[in-house]
Amino acid sequence: VRLVESGGGLVQPGGSLRLACAPSGDVFRVATMGWYRQAPGKQRELVAEIASDGITNYADFAKGRFTSSRDNAKNTMYLQMNSLKVEDTAVYFCNADLTEDYGMATLNYWGRGTQVTVSS
């Protein structure tokens, strides 16, 4: 099983994008899920995370512009990004604690990332 992100692309400043992330196959349980990003030459940083009960936590730069949500029936997490800025340009990675099957350990997984480019 791996995490698969989608929805990245090129957008103008002030525009919007919606990212999605889901496991590549059926899993037993998905706990906390999160979005991280990494810009060229910078460290990977937390964007937002969302627990299985829907409680969210956002980085300061994401508050008021980004909204994280999840559909537990589909084990899918979303990131709605509005009012995008040039400095939001980065590779966005999905992260999740998930249990592949009953009785197995809960492990932390990363997706391969999706590029978000904000440019005029």
Image (spheres, rainbow, N blue to C red):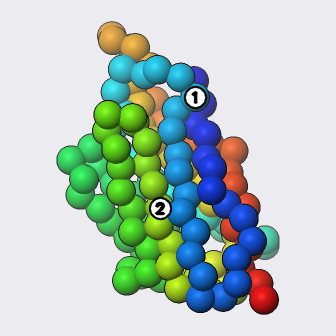
Res. 42 in view: no
Neighbour tally class for label 1: few under 14, some 14-19, many 20 plus, Cα within 10 Å = few
Q: Identify which residue, 1 or 76, lies in the foreground.
A: 76
Residue pointed to by mark 1: 24
Vertical order, 86 against 104 (above or below): below
Disc 2 marks which residue?
79
Q: Is residue 57 above or below residue 7?
A: below
Residue 8 in the image: state x and y as whole percent.
67, 60
Residue under the point 70% across and 84% down: 12
Q: Residues within 10 Å of mark 2 (few under 14, many from 20)?
A: many
Residue 120 picture location, percent across and down: 78, 89
Q: Quadrant of the N terminus?
A: top right
| Residue at x 39%, y 35% (from the top left corner) | 74
In the rendered image, residue 29, in percent from the top left (x then y), is placed at 34, 27
Viewer-closest of 18 and 28: 18
**Residue in the picture at 54% in, 63% down:** 18
SS at mark 2 in the image = strand
Which residue is painted at 61% across and 64% down in the image? 37
